[in-house]
Image (cartoon, rainbow, N blue to C red):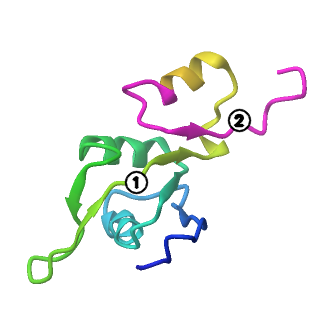
Amino acid sequence: RSLPPSCTTRLVVAAPRIIKPDEEGIWRTLLSLEPDALLVRSPGLVERLLSLGGTGTDIDVGTPDAPHVVRVPPLLGDFSLNVCNTPTAREWLGPDGGLARVTASYDLNARS
């Protein structure tokens, strides 16, 4: 993927909300696209990517015959993570949470 230096467009790929244990190929495929960020929509995917080292970690998403090393992009939290209060946001955005940004839950009202 090659864009001119003057291009400010960013590619953010959204992961499915549910990834079953035997569907590891899905997140590998998403990372192989080398997006500028990944919109994560489930705690399970965050956990999996953190177990690999999290944002900035180089991992091989290829095959034994054709390795393809990519860097885990910044992880952005989707509304489906139900961030509806400050303590929850701190957990996701803290050093162990793994997210660069979160989206507030749909359950919030204007006062919240």
Q: In the picture shown, does residue 60 fall above or below 74?
A: below
Q: Which residue is drawn at 47% across and 41% down?
A: 43
Res 25 quadrant in image = bottom left
The amino acid type of the residue labelled 1 equals: Pro
Name the foreground residue: 61 vs 11. Answer: 11
Identify the residue position indicated by label 1 in the image. 73
Question: Residue 85: x percent and y percent?
Answer: 68, 21
Residue at the farthest right position = 110
Q: Nearer the viewer, residue 62 or 108?
A: 62
Verify whether residue 94 appears in magenta: yes
Residue that lies at the very extreme toward the left in this rendered image = 64
Q: Residue 104 carries which label?
A: 2
Residue at left offset 32%, top offset 67% = 28
Residue density around tag 1, few if under 14, some if 14–19, many if 20 or more, within 10 Å: many
Magenta range: 92-112
Q: Gap between marks 2 and 1, in whole Å? A: 21 Å
Which three-letter amino acid code belongs to the residue tagged 2?
Ala
The dominant secondary structure in magenta is: loop
Tell whether position 52 is magenta.
no
Expressed as whole percent of the image width and height from the top left, the position of residue 13 reads 53, 64
Mark sitting earlier along the chain (2/1): 1
The residue lying toward the viewer, choosing from 73 and 104, is 73
